[in-house]
Image (tube, grey):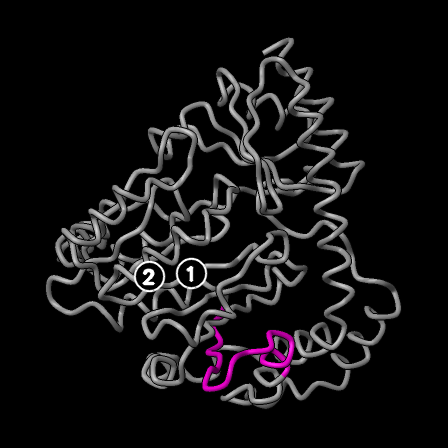
Amino acid sequence: MSSASSLASTLLRREILDLHAYHVPDSAGYIKLDAMENPYLLPHALRGEIADMVASAAINRYPDPSAASLKEKIRDVLGLPDGMDVLLGNGSDELIQFLAMALNKPGATLLGVEPSFVMYKMIATFTGMRYVGVPLAEDFSLDLPATLAAIRREQPALVFLAYPNNPTGNLFPADAVARIIEAAQGLVVVDEAYYAFAGNSFIPRLAHYPNLLVMRTFSKLGMAGLRLGFLAGSTAWLEQLEKLRLPYNVGVLPQLVAGILLEHHDVLLQQAEQIKRDRAALYRQLGGIAAVRVYPSEANFLLFRAANATEVFDGLKRRGVLIKNLHGGHPMLADCLRVTVGTPEENERFIVALQECLRHE
């Protein structure tokens, strides 16, 4: 009988065998600035309210399959236009997968810009969908003529635009994004994972574009551990995508805890405002280091370039600071690193460690 390894090599799709699993490093013992999380804890009173709710939660029962109460709170917070609804996912990754599965007719194409969120390309590969990436300009701005030309040429069934973009942090011009939506014959998904730190949103425009959906996650706003994302858009789209959602994909505790946090949405937005102030201070500090080029950001992280980025990354780890090494991930990200905005104390320790690395590595 064949070994498990040879059998897997025979039966698995070639594109799956060629993939590398998404790597999440062990962060124990580090100042964790690698995953775009909110570094601030909730106020004590709110944590107490959540603890009381969890203590009495019916975790012996399946969750509400429709998550009706949570969806109503999300609609209220968003102020959705009439005729629009939300579809919940276990993080935004699951929603990307729904979309690729639903639109992957034979020969269908998923189009994105590059560099951008790696899961667009990975999930296209998972589902066997053809992927086309359009390079950004050298300064990571949107190359609108090239993107429009690719849309005309490829006629993609599905387009993803991260707004702001990850890992570059910049917010593409709204009028350029609108032109992409208008040019596309397929569905365009504007991924607003970092909406709380940016200055614009396409949710108010949902009613204007029949081929537009807006995707968000609450992970960056302080709920990363809950794994909760949603699509907002026309019920004509969401009713069809609902058919792909596995039963009970959002558990009892995520529904209840997220519901409480949305009742205190102002607290989360206040933390986001603090992170924006921390981001501005960190940008100034990085900009003051001669050996570093830092890029403007409207997200909760900063992209910067330093010579010998991998050596710098390793040096930071030895000094107890974990950030994201992007070198080697895409040709345009050569010698690039990404740091999440932490607390002022965490940011200061990162800057001190970075300066030591640049002197000694």
Q: Earlier in the sequence, mark 2 or mark 1?
A: 2
Which residue is situated farthest in the right direction here? 45
- How far across and down, in percent of the image, does residue 215 sit? 46, 66
Q: Position of residue 31 (x, y in %)?
A: 70, 38
Q: Is residue 110 toward the left or the right of residue 23 in the image?
A: left
Split into 4 quadrants, where in the image is the C terminus? Answer: top right
Image marks 2 and 1: residues in contact by CB distance under 8 Å? yes
Q: Is residue 37 left or right of residue 1?
A: right
Horizontal side of 104 relative to 28 (left or right) equals: left
Is label 1 in a helix, a strand or a loop? strand
Image: magenta residue range: 73-90
Residue drawn at the location 49% of the way across and 76% of the way down: 88
| Residue depicted at x 70% and y 85% | 57
Residue on which the image places disc 2:
181
Q: Which residue was labeled with disc 1?
A: 190
Query: Which sits in the foreground, 262 or 27?
Result: 262
How far apart marks 2 and 1 lie (CA) works out to: 9 Å
Residue 185 lies, in percent from the top left, at 22, 65
User: In the rendered view, would you say 62 is above or below 172?
Assistant: below
The kind of residue on which mark 1 rests is Val
Q: Position of residue 329 (x, y in %)?
A: 37, 34
Residue 78 is a magenta residue: yes
Q: Nearer the viewer, residue 227 or 210?
A: 210
